Amino acid sequence: ARVRVMELDEQPSVTFEQVGGLKEEIEEVREAVEYPLTKPEIYERVGVEPPKGILLYGPPGTGKTLIAKAVARQSQARFIRMSGSELVHKYIGEGAQLVRELFILARERAPAIVFIDEIDAIGSMRTNDGTSGSAEVQRTLMQLLAEMDGFDNRGDVKIVAATNRIDILDRALLRPGRFDRMIEIPLPDHQGRLAILKIHTQHMNIGEDVNLAEVSRLTEGKNGADLRAICMEAGMFAIRMERDTVNSDDFMKAIDKLSVDFDRHHFHTT
Ligand code: ATP
C-alpha cells in the first residue's frame, strides 16, 4: 500500500517544451529548484540560501504537475510524488509515518524532488467543525513541518507542493524556511491557450482550415486540461466521420460538447 501513496518516477519524461505558456513562472521555478541543484555555486557566490521548497498555486488543470515533473527531469533529479488527499483519506492513522518515510526515501534517492500534490488536504487551517481525523491530519502536518525544518537549504532534496486552495492553507506552511517561495500558476490567457493547443495538436493531422487562434478565442476561461480534452475530442469526431484529417468543424463540435459537459457538471455540483 505504501508504494502507491508514494509514487517514485525515476526520470519523468515531461520536458518544459510540453508546457504551454507560463514562461516567467517556469523561469522562477528553475531559479528556485533547478539551479540550487545543478549550479549551487551561483547561490554560494552571491551568499544567499536557496529555498527548500516552493508552492505552486492556482486553479486546477493548469500545469502544476507538469512543471514539477519537467523541473525534476531538467535537474536530473528523481521525482517522488505524494498526494495530500490520498494521505488523509486512504491511509488514516499512517499519515505522519508516511511523511517520515517519504523524506527518508528522498534522502536515499537524492538528488530528488518531492512533489506534494493537494497539500491543502494536510495543510489547511484548523477548522472548528470537529471532523474526526483532524487531530490525525494535524499530526501529519506537524511531521511535514518538522521534516522541512530539519533539512538543509543547500541539500539535494527540494520540495514542490501544489494547491488549488491557497486561501485555506495553514500559515505555518508559508513561514520563512518552509514554503516561502509561492508561484502562481494562473489560467492561460489567449497566447497561453494558443501555445497549449499547439502542443496538443502537434502529432495530430490537422486540416488547413483549422485556425488555432480562433479555437483559443472561443475557449476563454478554459484550462490546459480542458484544451487537451478539446483536441482529443476533435480527433474523435474526425475518426467517427472516417476522415484522417481533423477539420475546423470537428474543433467547433468538440468545444460545444465540452462546454455542455462543463456546464452540466457545474450545475450538479453547485
Ligand atoms: P490539478 O491541480 O488538477 O492537479 P495541475 O495544475 O497539476 O492540476 P496538470 O496535472 O499539470 O494540472 O495538467 C493536467 C493535464 O492537462 C496535463 O497532463 C496536460 O496534458 C494538460 N495541461 C495542463 N496545463 C497545461 C499546459 N500549461 N501546457 C500543456 N498542457 C497542459
Image (spheres, helix red, strand yellow):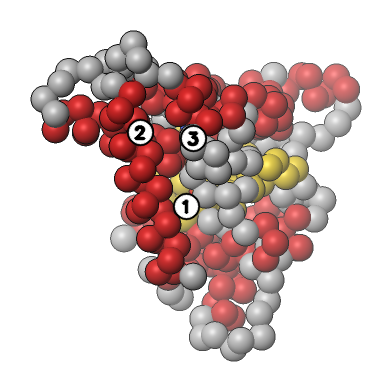
Q: In the visual, does 270 lie left or right of 204?
A: right
Label 2 packing within 10 angstroms: few (<14), some (14-19), many (20+): some
User: Amino acid under label 1?
Assistant: Met
Q: Which residue in the structure is indicated by mark 3?
A: 218
Q: State yes or no: discs 2 and 3 in contact (Cβ < 8 Å).
A: yes
Q: CA distance from mark 3 to mark 1?
A: 36 Å
Q: Is residue 72 above or below residue 166?
A: above
Q: CA distance from mark 1 to mark 2?
A: 38 Å
Q: Nearer the viewer, mark 3 or mark 1?
A: 3
Mark 1 and mark 2 lie on one chain; the one further toward the N terminus is 1
* Whole-percent x, y for residue 222 in the image: 50, 42
Label 3 packing within 10 angstroms: few (<14), some (14-19), many (20+): some
Considering every residue shown, the one lying at the far right of the view is 47
Q: Secondary structure at mark 1?
A: strand
* Whole-percent x, y for residue 270 in the image: 49, 70
Q: Secondary structure at mark 2?
A: helix
Q: Nearer the viewer, mark 1 or mark 2?
A: 2
Q: Which residue in the structure is indicated by mark 1?
A: 82
Label 1 packing within 10 angstroms: few (<14), some (14-19), many (20+): many
Depth check: give the residue in front, 261 or 180: 261
Q: Secondary structure at mark 3?
A: loop
- The image quadrant of residue 30 is top right
Q: Which residue in the structure is indicated by mark 2?
A: 252
Considering every residue shown, the one lying at the far top of the view is 208
- The image quadrant of residue 47 is top right
